[in-house]
Image (cartoon, rainbow, N blue to C red):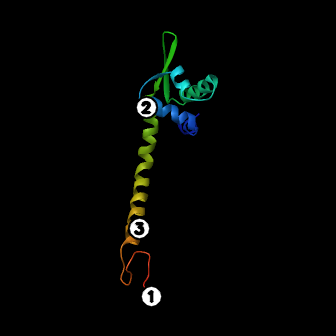
Amino acid sequence: MTIFEALADPTRRRIVEMLSRGALSAGEIGRRFSTSPSAVSQHLRVLREARLVTVRAAAQQRIYELDPTGLAEFDEWLDRIGPAWLDRLDAMDRERQESAAPQPGRRYPGFTDDR
């Protein structure tokens, strides 16, 4: 499963967001959801397989934290598409500013005074 497939699920996105604040045990993660522990365990397995989280044993607990490897892969993807999106967003912003600028014969943007 790819990173994007793993993050397509809102529960898994919430888990990643929780872990961005620090490591948590499987029990701590599970208590934050109304689903069964088995369902949360399945979500954690998918996130592990996508290399978004790692797990380590600490006594009787399984501690989950974000995996820098998977996050770096996601970051590399953003670096590849980022410049193209920034160009598009800049063009949209210029268009918005041009359409909002007052034009001769108009008192207000978007309103034509036909007197």
Residue 84 spot, x, y in % from top left: 43, 54
Q: Amino acid at mark 3?
A: Glu
Residue 96's disc number: none
Q: Secondary structure at mark 1?
A: loop
Q: Residue tagged by mark 2?
A: 20
Residue depth check, mark 2 versus mark 3: number of the one nearer the observer: 2
Query: As displayed, is residue 84 above or below residue 44?
Result: below
Of the 4 image quadrants, the one containing the C terminus is bottom left
Which mark is on residue 114?
1
Q: Is residue 26 left or right of residue 20?
A: right
- Near mark 2 (Cα within 10 A), the count class, few <14, some 14-19 or many ≥20, is few
What amino acid does circle 2 point to? Ser
The secondary structure type at the circle numbered 2 is loop
Gap between marks 1 and 2, in whole Å? 57 Å
Q: Is residue 96 above or below residue 23?
A: below
Q: Are marks 2 and 3 in contact (CB under 8 Å)?
A: no
- The residue lying at 39 percent from left, 76 percent from top is 108
Q: Alpha carbon of mark 2 to alpha carbon of mark 3: how far?
A: 36 Å
Residue at image mark 3: 95
Residue closer to the observer: 72 or 113: 113
Name the element at disc 3: helix
Q: Where is residue 88, by image quadrant? A: bottom left
Above or below for 54 versus 79: above
- Residue 33 image offset from top left, x and y in percent: 57, 29
Q: Nearer the viewer, mark 1 or mark 3?
A: 1
- How packed is label 3: few (under 14 Cα within 10 Å), some, or many (20 or more)? few
Quadrant that contains the N terminus: top right
In terms of depth relative to the viewer, which is nearer, 83 or 12? 12
From the viewer's perspective, tell me whether residue 33 is left or right of residue 19: right
Query: Mark 1 packing: few (<14 Cα in 10 Å), some, or many (20+)?
Result: few
Q: How far across and down, in percent of the image, does residue 45 sit? A: 58, 25
